[in-house]
């Protein structure tokens, strides 16, 4: 069997972290004859011809984080003849043409060696510096063995324009690419676009292998070799699935996702700028905490978070702010990795990429909150409002009321009714106490009917919490009015500590960077929706759902006061546009200040490449919730969510809502305007692999909508029947 041939001597210029300075040279060789490529970059020449080495580079090549003079190139070496713990090296070559007739010198050589360390899964990452701006380069990696020299697929990448260039840019924005049972037809379509780069807003992987609550369970599926290291759900049943937990699990996901040909082709041809959202670690996470069990158990797992972070470091082509950053598995979370960073593209574009998952505070309403627990007392409400809201209702101090009789009954019923007996303390809502007693076959106490003299307040149930251990009423479907009031009181009381999205350090950096940007456009690569997503169900006779709800408070609606604080700074700047992902829907809007919504920025939201659309997920959520699934009309409402978003007038800031398509966004930008095109494909087409489809047939599967923002203006325009129409907040229509 062939053995790996170790380099005979290390490149004297090769630093531990493989930083390269590149200078342009003109090679004198004919196409195809690469005899000049030295195996050891300056050592003995290896004149053996190159052979197809795709098998040694099974994830092909990826580039990312283009700057005017640098880019990151990535590959991963896989050679079964290498011992598990053996480090290796591959040679990187850079050229100005796809045939590699004109090589670019790297540290004075025609190529350079880059480490493929066993501790990083033999991922190879090189920052190539000293490049020309706005220039296309080609790169490849060579693996030398004693039976030959094996070359990776060729990658194409492109540097950013120089800071003073009056450059027009064209890029794509994507997010959410669930692999299970779905295909990357968006990427296949995107390959036909001429792009400078693409922005990935997160959910590059999904950590679960077919969670039926939101994923497909048929078709292609990600699997784990290290099942013992994964989290198993429904273990031993035919509904068994897993969530990544070990480093091996997370690495395997990146390898599996990059087995997709359409994704590989995009990576081989366009550099990526990526941040993460939740699924790179775990669904609806905050910090190192997962939410699978809705508060039934402590889901803090620093080791799991670090495994996810390390795999992301290894597989993503990122130019970290700390330029020589290398992931240290011994470093403590959250200081183990810092991914927020910014990019300049000529005179007209600054792109600021944030991390809204590592440092955020918990969702305000705990998943295991007891619905009857009072969150705002009469005194607190009076202090804030000067009067009691109509929805406020009577409560008692359960510890002392009736000598503790009711407390004893409720504590005794805790396991039967599935709540934590420790939560039966303090002020509890009388209506909820009575409804709980009514669920018991026989209670030793009567309902509380004498309400005279009792104080009135708001409990978790007034925020939409209907049952303990549920995401509905905690992260989803929260009653807007009561939530706004409670969230804001808490925010003030905590000195702004609640509702933290970025952590103080990142937030200071974010605002400084946005304010300091000299470029025309200040674009924010933002993981979740800024524009509020509200539905008004008050006209509908579906108790207890005849309320005005936030759809999702895992996103910025759940941090409305922090959002207000940030937008308060951003609206002072010109030409701020948020580019957003996460929500699996195409939206466009004008997110503004709580007290003065007409002071706003603009936001363009792209749907997922492949993940279940917002509408589909909503229908599944309703079906899975014990209360909603029994509520007449709820499923139909979920199915027609866009009608609710756009017809109610509660979302005057929401200028476009399409919650039922997948796809991607392309953006064209210059000193005058940003024009975004939403490329939408119907969800059923995502279940079919269209990768080999002729370009016209594939394009015919997509519809498109175009939006525009002009420099110096905050108005959002949509192209309607060939004319640009302005979104009017007052009439919530295009005029
Ligand atoms: Fe997603």
Image: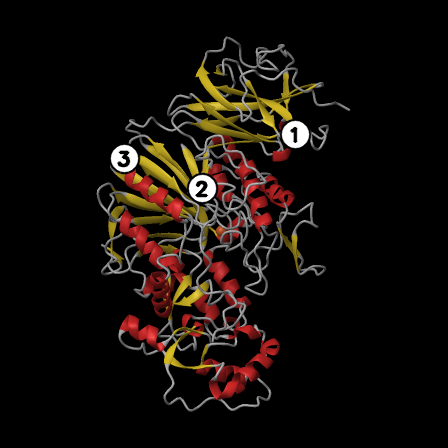
Q: Position of residue 286 (x, y in %)?
A: 49, 54
Residue at the disc numbered 2: 699
At horizontal 65% and vertical 55% (from top left) the residue drawn is 241
Residue 141 found in image quarter: top right
Q: Position of residue 74 (x, y in %)?
A: 54, 30
Q: Nearer the viewer, residue 342 or 500?
A: 500
CB contact under 8 Å: marks 2 and 1: no
Q: In the structure shown, which secondary structural element does the residue marked by tag 2 occupy? A: helix
| Nearer-N-terminus badge (3/1) | 1
Distance of mark 3 from mark 1, alpha carbons? 46 Å
Q: Does residue 608 appear to the left or right of 643 in the view shown?
A: right
- Please identify the quadrant where the N terminus is shown: top right
Q: Let me know if residue 499 appears in the view.
A: yes
At horizontal 61% and vertical 55% (from top left) the residue drawn is 217
| Nearer-N-terminus badge (3/2) | 3
Nearest to the eye among marks 3 and 1: give it. 3
Image mark for residue 103: none
At horizontal 26% and vertical 43% (from top left) the residue drawn is 575
Q: Nearer the viewer, residue 138 or 488?
A: 488
Q: Let me know if residue 532 appears in the view.
A: no
Distance of mark 2 from mark 1, alpha carbons? 31 Å
Distance of mark 3 from mark 2, alpha carbons? 37 Å
Task: Relative to 112, say whether 326 is above or below.
Answer: below
Q: Position of residue 37 (x, y in %)?
A: 58, 14
Image mark for residue 55: 1
């Amino acid at each position: 069997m062939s053995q790996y041939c170790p380099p005979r001597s290390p490149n004297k210029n090769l630093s531990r972290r493989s930083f390269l300075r590149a200078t342009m040279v003109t090679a004198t060789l004919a196409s195809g004859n690469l005899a000049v490529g030295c195996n050891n970059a300056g050592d003995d020449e290896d004149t053996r011809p190159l052979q197809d080495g795709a098998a040694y580079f099974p994830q092909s090549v990826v580039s990312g984080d283009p700057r005017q003079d640098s880019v990151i190139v990535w590959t991963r070496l896989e050679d079964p003849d290498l011992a598990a713990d053996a480090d290796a090296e591959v040679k990187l070559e850079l050229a100005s043409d796809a045939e590699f007739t004109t090589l670019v010198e790297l540290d004075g050589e025609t190529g350079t060696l880059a480490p493929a360390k066993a501790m990083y899964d033999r991922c190879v990452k090189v920052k190539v510096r000293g490049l020309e701006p706005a220039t296309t380069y080609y790169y490849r990696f060579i693996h030398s063995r004693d039976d030959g020299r094996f070359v990776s697929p060729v990658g194409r990448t492109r540097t950013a324009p120089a800071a003073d260039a009056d450059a027009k840019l064209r890029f794509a924005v994507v997010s959410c690419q669930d692999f299970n049972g779905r295909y990357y037809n968006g990427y296949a379509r995107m390959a036909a676009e001429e792009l400078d780069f693409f922005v990935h807003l997160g959910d590059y992987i999904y950590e679960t292998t077919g969670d039926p609550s939101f994923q497909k369970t048929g078709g292609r599926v990600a699997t784990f070799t290290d099942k013992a290291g994964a989290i198993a759900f429904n273990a031993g049943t035919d509904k068994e699935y897993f969530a990544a937990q070990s480093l091996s699990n997370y690495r395997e996901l990146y390898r599996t996702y990059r087995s997709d040909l359409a994704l590989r082709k995009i990576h081989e041809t366009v550099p990526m700028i990526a941040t993460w959202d939740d699924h790179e670690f775990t669904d609806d996470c905050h910090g190192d905490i997962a939410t699978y069990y809705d508060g039934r158990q402590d889901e803090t797992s620093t080791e799991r978070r670090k495994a996810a972070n390390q795999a992301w470091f290894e597989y993503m082509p990122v130019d970290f702010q700390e330029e020589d950053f290398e992931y240290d598995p011994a470093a403590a979370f959250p200081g183990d990795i810092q991914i927020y960073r910014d990019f300049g593209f000529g005179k007209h574009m600054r792109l600021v990429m944030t991390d809204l998952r590592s440092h955020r505070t918990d969702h305000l309403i705990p998943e295991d909150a007891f619905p009857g627990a009072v969150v705002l007392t009469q005194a607190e409400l009076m202090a804030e409002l000067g009067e009691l809201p109509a929805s406020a209702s009577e409560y008692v101090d359960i510890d002392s009321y009736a000598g503790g009789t009711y407390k004893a009954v409720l504590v005794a019923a805790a396991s039967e009714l599935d709540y934590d007996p420790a939560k039966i303390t303090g002020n509890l809502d009388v209506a909820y106490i009575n409804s709980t007693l009514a669920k018991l076959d026989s209670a030793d106490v009567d309902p509380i009917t004498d309400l005279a003299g009792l104080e009135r307040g708001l409990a978790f149930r007034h925020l939409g919490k209907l049952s303990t251990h549920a995401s509905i009423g905690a992260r989803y479907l929260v009653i807007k009015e009561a939530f706004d009031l409670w969230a804001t009181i808490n925010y003030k009381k905590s000195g702004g500590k609640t509702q933290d999205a970025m952590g103080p350090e990142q937030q200071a950096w974010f605002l400084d960077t946005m304010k300091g940007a000299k470029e025309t456009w200040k674009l924010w690569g933002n993981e979740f929706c800024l524009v509020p997503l509200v539905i008004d169900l008050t006209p509908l006779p579906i108790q207890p759902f005849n309320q005005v709800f936030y759809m999702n408070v895992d996103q910025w609606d759940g941090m409305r006061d922090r959002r207000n604080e940030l937008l308060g700074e951003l609206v002072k700047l010109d030409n701020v546009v948020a580019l957003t992902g996460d929500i699996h829907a195409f939206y466009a809007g004008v997110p503004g200040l709580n007290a003065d919504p007409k002071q706003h920025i603009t936001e363009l939201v792209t749907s997922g490449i492949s993940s279940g659309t917002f509408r589909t997920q909503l229908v599944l959520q309703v079906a899975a919730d014990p209360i909603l699934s029994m509520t007449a009309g709820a499923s139909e409402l979920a199915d027609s969510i866009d009608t609710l978003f756009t017809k109610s007038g509660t979302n005057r800031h929401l200028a476009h809502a399409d919650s039922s398509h997948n796809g991607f966004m392309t953006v064209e930008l210059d000193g005058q305007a940003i024009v975004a095109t939403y490329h939408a494909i119907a969800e059923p087409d995502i279940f079919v692999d269209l990768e080999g489809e002729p370009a016209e047939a594939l394009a015919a599967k997509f519809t498109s909508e175009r939006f525009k923002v002009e420099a110096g203006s905050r108005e959002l325009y949509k192209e309607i029947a060939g004319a640009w129409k302005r979104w009017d907040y007052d009439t919530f229509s295009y005029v």
